[in-house]
Image: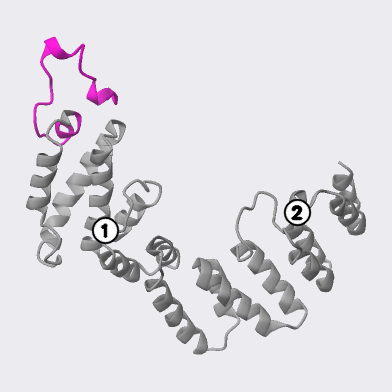
Amino acid sequence: MRQTIASARGDLDLLIALEAKKQPHMQDYLGIAAQLLEAGRSAEALDWVRKPGRRALGETGSDLSPARVSLEARILEATDERPAAQALRWCCFEATLSADILREHLKQLPDFEDIETEDRAHALALEKAKPEAALQFFLDWPRLDLAAKLIVMHPHRWNGGDWHSLPKAAALLEHDYPLAATILYRALLDDILDRARSKAYRHGAEYLGKLALLAEATDTTRPNEQAGHAAYLAKLKTAHPRKSGFWARVGEGDPAPPQASRSRRPNWDRGDG
């Protein structure tokens, strides 16, 4: 409450004094640093952004978290340390593949040098040890062609349980990059069936429908080690013959169990089982 009053009065020194009395893990280092920067007190801002244990409220990232690096780089530029700011941004990009940090870095480069650096960033992302981070970067940039290339480079890497992002990525790619979309849709469908996620069978049936539509475009260009759609479908039927709730949604199997067994079997369409 005292800090709220200090902020309303524009008393930054009182606000900082009150913040400094808190336990280190409770201090809003980035918030104070940002206010000091806005007030033109760059040297003090740099001290706060670099304090041991620094973090913004709610932030759980490392020292190279994009939010902190973005702020520290702006503070460094305000203190005429532009090379150090750029070096920090690039180091952060290498560690996190943050599209926002790369944009900030490129904005400070001369013409033509930014193009060369962008190409270097793309090459680095393709070689990243964690393709998941690289995929998010290419989607955020956006470079869908490189996202598709990355997916095809690592066909078995994608976690079908990542239903927050993979369906969106597959939908973005399915028109121009059907092979990459096929890899993602298969990963999603395999995860649903392998884990018997009956409440997601509706989505699984949708993914299988998309795979059937994509098959004509992908079966002629797919790598030899990747099964064609007919072989993939046959494998699903062999591996999951008793998942009647799923097959009923795609028009396969017996969609209506006998009346006598209904009390012992789940209602698939209701999402049981």
Q: Is residue 12 above or below residue 234?
A: below
Locate the N terminus and report the quarter of the image it occupies: top right
The answer to whether residue 40 is visible is no
> For mark 2, does the 10 Å Cα neighbourhood hold few (<14), some (14 to 19), or many (20 or more) residues?
many
The residue where tag 2 is placed is 28
The answer to whether residue 106 is visible is yes
Q: Is residue 142 above or below residue 15?
A: below
Front disc: 1 or 2: 1
- Kindly state the secondary structure of the residue where label 1 is placed: loop
Q: Main secondary structure of the magenta part?
A: loop
Q: Identify the amino acid type marked 2.
A: Asp
The residue located at (30%, 54%) in the rendering is 171
Q: Left or right: where does residue 201 sit relative to residue 120? A: left
Q: Position of residue 257 (x, y in %)?
A: 12, 19
> For mark 1, does the 10 Å Cα neighbourhood hold few (<14), some (14 to 19), or many (20 or more) residues?
few
Q: Rounded to the nearest whole Å, what is the CA distance between mark 1 and mark 2?
A: 42 Å
The residue where tag 1 is placed is 156
Q: Position of residue 30 (x, y in %)?
A: 73, 59
Span colored in magenta: 245-273
Q: Left or right: where does residue 61 sit relative to residue 80? A: left
Image quadrant assignment for residue 61: bottom right
- What colour scheme has been applied to the protein in the rendered image? one colour
Q: Identify the amino acid type marked 1.
A: His
Which residue is nearer to you in this view: 76 or 55?
55
Q: Position of residue 262 (x, y in %)?
A: 18, 14
Asked if the magenta segment contains residue 145, the reply would be no
Query: Does label 1 or label 2 sit earlier along the sequence?
Result: 2
Image quadrant assignment for residue 108: bottom right
